[in-house]
Image: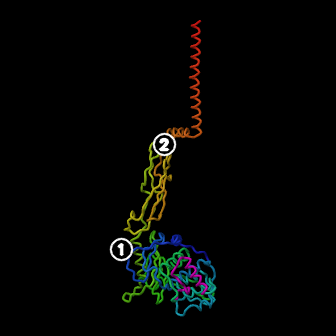
Amino acid sequence: MKKRRFPAAVLLLAILCSLSFSFRAAAAREGEPKIRSNAAILYEVTSGELVYEKNGKQKAYPASTTKIMTALLALENCEMDEPVTVTRAALNTVSPGSSIAGLQNGEVLSMYEMLECLLVASGNDAASVIAAHIGGTVAQFVEMMNERSRELGCTSTHYTNPSGLHDEEHYTTAEDLLKVTVEAMKHPEFVEIVGSAQVTIPETNKVDHPRYFNNTNQLISQAVTSVNLYSKATGIKTGHTTPAGYCLVSSAENGDLSYIAIVLGGYIDENTGRNYSYVDSINLFLWGFSDFKYRTIVSTSDLVKELEVDLAKEKDFVILRAAEDVTAFLHEDDDIDAIFTKTISVQENITAPVERGDILGTMTILRGSEVYARVDLVATNTVERSEGLYYFEQLGAFFEKPLVRAFVALLLAALIVYIIFVIFYNKRRRNINRRKRQRGLDD
């Protein structure tokens, strides 16, 4: 299979998603959207902030959003050009009347094409074929699914099949589903597939014509209706069974903001015909993009502190600024000073020369009691050295050395001894001369 090129935006999102996964509990905010579905989450990818949560820990049936985990295991265990053969045993595990991609017994597709059938067409047959290919049997693959979910920290998830077909013991939560989705979004192939409005499966050894599948996600595909199209949407996966209701895991990007929304237990309004899994997801995105942004906590243009500089030729001070901007994902009404505190640590006894850009300190930014960021403080100006002051200081420093001081002390002691000797010598000579003069007078 030829090597695929991924758009820069796809790779960027994958990189952002590769950051460590943790999120703060979402606090209720004035103006947040009214969510009609049973459970919902809005998560900002780069910051790891959980912006909105409704019943995030409540047990729910995931329906075909289960296929995100199935795809994750395929991405982690297979090459994308790896051939996958459809088997009768795998097809026999697919319930009649469920969503399928029309795979034929003995048909061979690449794993990438299988994932297109799984994620875009939402084929339960593709889910079973992938499961049997990786696990040996569908049942063994389900064990892998449960083990992987535990590794990801999912505490309220249990799988009984790879497709999401309803089973009382097949359940998850919005929070757990978010963890699986974030992990899957680390893979550029996953991001590309779930963001495709339509895919084409070329002819195979069993089918002599191309097959075209429109994405079941109406945020990015208008094959069914255009009422739910959302221009900022980039994926991800739909799901529906009668017990689960309408489920949607979706993503959207706008500027430097990247969101994942999880909506479980949505329904169709009998009066308007609107599917609230889409209505709720779009409203979450609209609110997230309008009311939240990355705000500057520390700017490189801010003058942080002025320090005295010794041995300066003319200007005897240096002004410090942050080496880089520090931003934080916040609501537009959040009080930055109430959320963040800053402490400054600078070098002591700074001496010239100082070059612009020299690191002379550090600013630590706390969010509550946790360190949010650390940034270097650098000089905004150059301070030249006074050579006269420098050499004078060097002379003083020379005489401060212990050996030099000991030598000087010995020299002074020798000088004192010499002076005392000279004094006593001169005094003795004067006495001798006086006695000689005295004897001369007596004679």
Left or right of 441? Residue 378 is: left
Q: Residue at x 40, y 69 (%)?
A: 331
Q: Which residues are magenta?
A: 139-165
Left or right of 15? Residue 231 is: left
**What type is the residue that disc 2 sits on?**
Leu
Question: According to the image, label 2 marks what residue?
Answer: 311
Where is residue 429 drawn, in percent x and y? Answer: 59, 17
Mark 2 residue crowding within 10 angstroms, few (<14) / some (14–19) / many (20+): many
Where is residue 242 drawn, in percent x and y? Answer: 46, 90
Element type at marker 2? Answer: loop
Examine the rendered structure and indicate whether residue 342 appears above or below residue 291. Answer: above
Where is residue 397 drawn, in percent x and y? Answer: 54, 40
Q: Residue at x 57, y 73 (%)?
A: 5
| Residue 361 in sight | yes
| Residue 253 in sight | no
Question: According to the image, label 1 marks what residue?
Answer: 30
Quarter of image, res 73: bottom right
Mark 1 residue crowding within 10 angstroms, few (<14) / some (14–19) / many (20+): few
Examine the rendered structure and indicate whether residue 323 appears above or below residue 397. Answer: below
Q: Quadrant of the N terminus?
A: bottom right
Q: Give yes or no for residue 159 being in the magenta stretch.
A: yes
